[in-house]
Amino acid sequence: MKSLPPAWFDQSYYSNYYPDHDRKNTARKLAYYRDTLARFLPPPGASPPKVLDLGCAFGLFVAALDPRWQAYGTDVSEFAISRARTVVPHATFAVMRDGLIPFDERFAAVAAWDVLEHIPDLDDIAIQVREHLVAGGIFAFAVPVYDGPLGRLVNYLDKDATHINRFPRRFWLELAQRHFALADWCGAFRYLLPGGYYIHWANHALRHVSPAVVVVARKE
């Protein structure tokens, strides 16, 4: 699978594009993501569920997972993985090379929060995720969307040159349905306000006009 050069995601990438990375990943937002997984996880087996954070960056979401779960994370950035290992020493991390998920395990859930917009071959990564899920496992992801009344504003504010997939919400729903059974989707409004307060509001009522969507799909 083709992927963007890992060198694009070194320390300077985070300094230039996401100097407020930690402030944008508040405890409330991470808890929402964790609880989303918990609602849709398949029935527990004999051992704790394994959960993979695809594009884990500094491991903040991995750190927020239920401590009873087996936590894994991967990212193309060696810089990010190095920091993640210090943030969550009990989790299992590996650098993602050549666009391939670097684990042999099968997971109850794979999450990709604000990651898919960076990946050139989306069908390939969806196939990989499916192969790495247990039967009934879930794939949950969040992406910005560039349609609706806020689409032009989202595109204008998005300065990240590695966001190569600037698609409407219909595209992402169709991608999920090609490879999985769509379980749920909602809209998300998020913005870092002056003064450092970060808004994260997810809901179903405004999912057709929100600047981002959260999608949950299941392997049948």
Image (cartoon, rainbow, N blue to C red):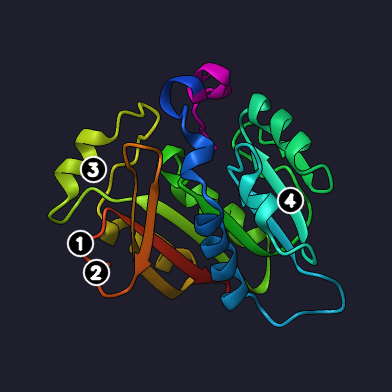
Tell me which amino acid carries mark 2.
Answer: Leu
**Mark nearer the N terminus (2 vs 3):** 3
Disc 2 crowd, CA 10 A, few/some/many (<14, 14-19, 20+): few
Decide if residue 95 is on the left or right side of residue 215.
right
Secondary element at tag 1 = loop
- Residue at numbered disc 1: 209
Secondary element at tag 3 = helix
Q: Nearer the viewer, residue 107 or 192?
A: 192
In this view, the residue farthest toward the bottom is 43
Marks 1, 4: nearer the viewer: 1
Disc 1 crowd, CA 10 A, few/some/many (<14, 14-19, 20+): some
Marks 1,2: beta carbons within 8 A: yes
**Mark nearer the N terminus (3 vs 1):** 3
Q: Is residue 13 magenta?
A: yes
Tell me which amino acid carries mark 3.
Answer: Val
Tell me which amino acid carries mark 4.
Answer: Tyr
Marks 3, 4: nearer the viewer: 3
Marks 2,3: beta carbons within 8 A: no
Location of the C terminus (image quadrant)? bottom right
- Residue at numbered disc 2: 206
In this view, the residue farthest toward the left is 149
- Residue at numbered disc 3: 154
Tell me which amino acid carries mark 1.
Answer: Val
Which residue does the image show at 31% across and 37% down from the upper left?
Answer: 194
Q: Which mark is residue 72?
A: 4
In this view, the residue farthest toward the right is 46
Disc 4 crowd, CA 10 A, few/some/many (<14, 14-19, 20+): many
The answer for how far apart the CA atoms under marks 1 and 4 are is 33 Å
Q: What segment is highlighted magenta in the picture? A: 1-14
The answer for how far apart the CA atoms under marks 2 and 3 are is 16 Å
On the image, the x and y values in percent for residue 62 come to 68, 51
